[in-house]
Image (cartoon, rainbow, N blue to C red):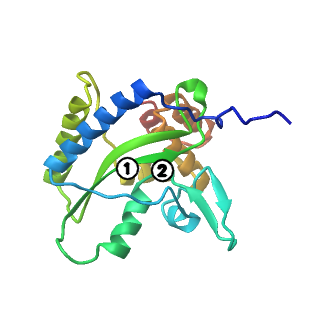
Amino acid sequence: MTNKVYQVPYGTKDILPGEMKTRRGIENAIINVFDKWGYDEVKTPDFEYVDTFGAAGAKGDFRFFDRSNNLLALRNDMTAPIARLTATRLQGGEKIKRLCYLANLYRYEEIQAGRQCEFEQAGVEMLGASGAAADAEVIVLAAEALQAAGLQKFAISLGHVDFINGLAEKAGFDAAQLQQLKDCLRRHDAVGMQQMADAMENIRPEIKQLFAD
């Protein structure tokens, strides 16, 4: 067995002093933007019960048992933990809740593609609001946060879960294929999406074209 005392796990890395200082400055700039827009920062555990993620269709890539034999998972998404926190700890009060976070996430990724299995994500969740005004607020906030982080050229991709679910239904995808489709979208893997559509024998041409677009 290879001695791994001086190695870090696959998909992780050390952050050195100069890089850490730069990173902390970017983090603070982003959180300051969120705060200016009225979003309150919250923090959830790095791991949760698998059932928490299972309700959202994402059970996590890194799972383990605790001493009571409960199945836990390192979080690979923040939507489910924020939803759990809101439902259990933030009942009542203002109807619209604006929450933000800066958190480490864990997904098994191919690091050859420039991704890490452990990475940091900053984001916001607006709960209890709907309509164009709410969508516009989050989009403008995202643009301002990216600029505060030092980016001047960027693209913001918009999506809607009902569109994705409807597209998968029209294509005849089962639950496993739907999850695979969402994974491709998360990775911006256009080739993988096209391959999924090409593998379906009875998919209509206009539906297949949507995967290419």
Q: Quadrant of residue 121?
A: top left
The correct choice, above or below, for 131 with respect to 196 in the image is: below
Q: Residues within 10 Å of mark 1 (few under 14, many from 20)?
A: few
Q: Residues within 10 Å of mark 2 (few under 14, many from 20)?
A: few
Q: Amino acid at mark 1?
A: Phe
- Whether residue 172 is visible: no
Q: Quadrant of residue 175?
A: bottom right
Give the labeled residue for mark 2.
170
Q: Amino acid at mark 2?
A: Lys
The residue at the point 29 percent across, 72 percent down is 90
- Whether residue 175 sits left or right of residue 165 in the image: it is right
Image quarter (top left, top right, bottom left or bottom right) of the N terminus = top right
- Whether residue 156 sits left or right of residue 61 in the image: it is left
What is the x, y in percent for residue 212?
A: 45, 30
The correct choice, above or below, for 156 with respect to 102 in the image is: above
* Label 1 SS: helix
- Whether residue 90 sits left or right of residue 106 in the image: it is left
The residue at the point 38 percent across, 65 percent down is 83
Q: Quadrant of residue 87?
A: bottom left
> Looking at the rendered structure, which numbered label has been put on residue 163?
1
Between 4 and 150, the one lying in front of the other is 4
